[in-house]
Image (tube, grey):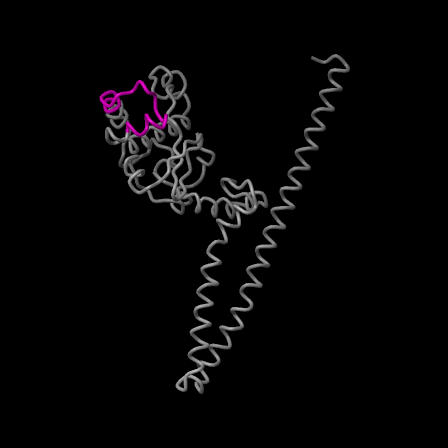
Amino acid sequence: MSRDSTKSTDTYGLAGRPTGARPLHRQKMIQRQIVITEQVDLRHEPRIFPKPLPDYILNHQFWKETICNNAALHASSCGFLLSYAWLLCHPSDLKIALELGLISSEIIWKDWTTFVDTVLTNIDCEALDMVNKRYQYGELRLSRLHAIYRLTPIFKPEHFIRGFLYGYSRYTVFFTRNFGWVLLVFLYITIVLDAMQVSLGTTKLQDNKIFQRASYSFAVFSIVLPVFTVSIGLLLFSCFFVFNLLKTKMFLKSRKQYRRALIRSRAVGVP
C-alpha cells in the first residue's frame, strides 16, 4: 500500500514527526490544498495528498479472507485506517471527506464513530506494534522524502534526478520552484553592496583597512556567486536534458522491439 513501506523508522524520522496527522478541518484552517492521490506517503507544503478510503477495507469479510492472511498487508491496512481515524475526528472532517470523495457517501457520522471505536479497540495506539512503520508518522514532508530518496540507501542516477515524486512536466517549473530563492539572495547582495559603497564614502570608514578588505572580499564574492549559480543551473539542465533524452530513446526502442516481436508472433501464428 506504500511504495517505501520497508524503509527504517529512522528514515521516516527524518521526513516527519511520530505524531498523528492533523484532522481535515485543521488542514483547511491552515490553508492546505487537499489533493486526492493513490499514494499514501506524501505531504508537501501547502498541499496534502490523501489516498481515498476504499469500501473493501471497511468490509469485515474482506479482512477475514484477505487482509488477515498476510502480515504485511494487515500492518499496512491497520495503519491506513489509523491515519483516517486521525483525519476524521469531527463531523466537519467527515463532511470535508465526503465532499472530496475520500470516503463512501453512504457513511454517516454515527457509523463512522462506531467503526473507529472498533478499530482503536484492536490497535494499541501507544505501542503501534501492529501498524506499519510508515503510519507511525502521520505527515511526511515531500521535500525531505526527495532528499532521502536521492541519497539513500544507494546512490542511483535516476533516483537523484527524479527524486521521490517526479512532478515536473517542464524545465521552467523545476527551476522556478528550486531556484526562486536565488533572486532574494541577489537582492540582498545588491543592498549590502550599496550600503558598503555609501559607507566607503564616509570619512570614518574610508580609511578603515578592515572594512575595505571586507568590502573587497564581498565584492569579489558577489561577482563569483552569480557565475557559480548559473553554472550549477546549466549543469542541472544538461543532466535533466540528457537523462530525459536517453529515457525517451530507451522507451522508443523497447516499444519498437515489442512491436516487432508482436508482428513476428502473428506471422508464425502464435496466439
| Numbered range of the magenta stretch | 94-114
- Residue drawn at (75%, 12%) of the image: 269
Residue 79 position, x and y percent, is 35, 31
- Check the image and report above or below for 17 versus 259: below
Magenta-span inclusion, residue 97: yes
Quarter holding the C terminus? top right
- Check the image and report above or below for 145 versus 202: above
Residue 206 placement: quadrant: bottom left
Magenta-span inclusion, residue 123: no
- Is 61 displayed left or right of 118 in the figure? right
Residue 59 placement: quadrant: top left
- Is 143 displayed left or right of 228 in the figure? left
Instruction: Mark yes or no: residue 155 visible.
Output: no
- Check the image and report above or below for 107 versus 100: above
Residue 145 position, x and y percent, is 45, 44
Residue 7 position, x and y percent, is 45, 39
How many numbered callouts? Answer: 0
Q: Nearer the viewer, residue 16 or 45?
A: 45
- Residue drawn at (24%, 26%) of the image: 121
- Check the image and report above or below for 102 versus 209: above
- Residue drawn at (47%, 67%) of the image: 190
Q: Could you tell me what secondary structure mostly forms the magenta stretch? A: helix
Instruction: Mark yes or no: residue 161 visible.
Output: yes
Quarter holding the N terminus? top left
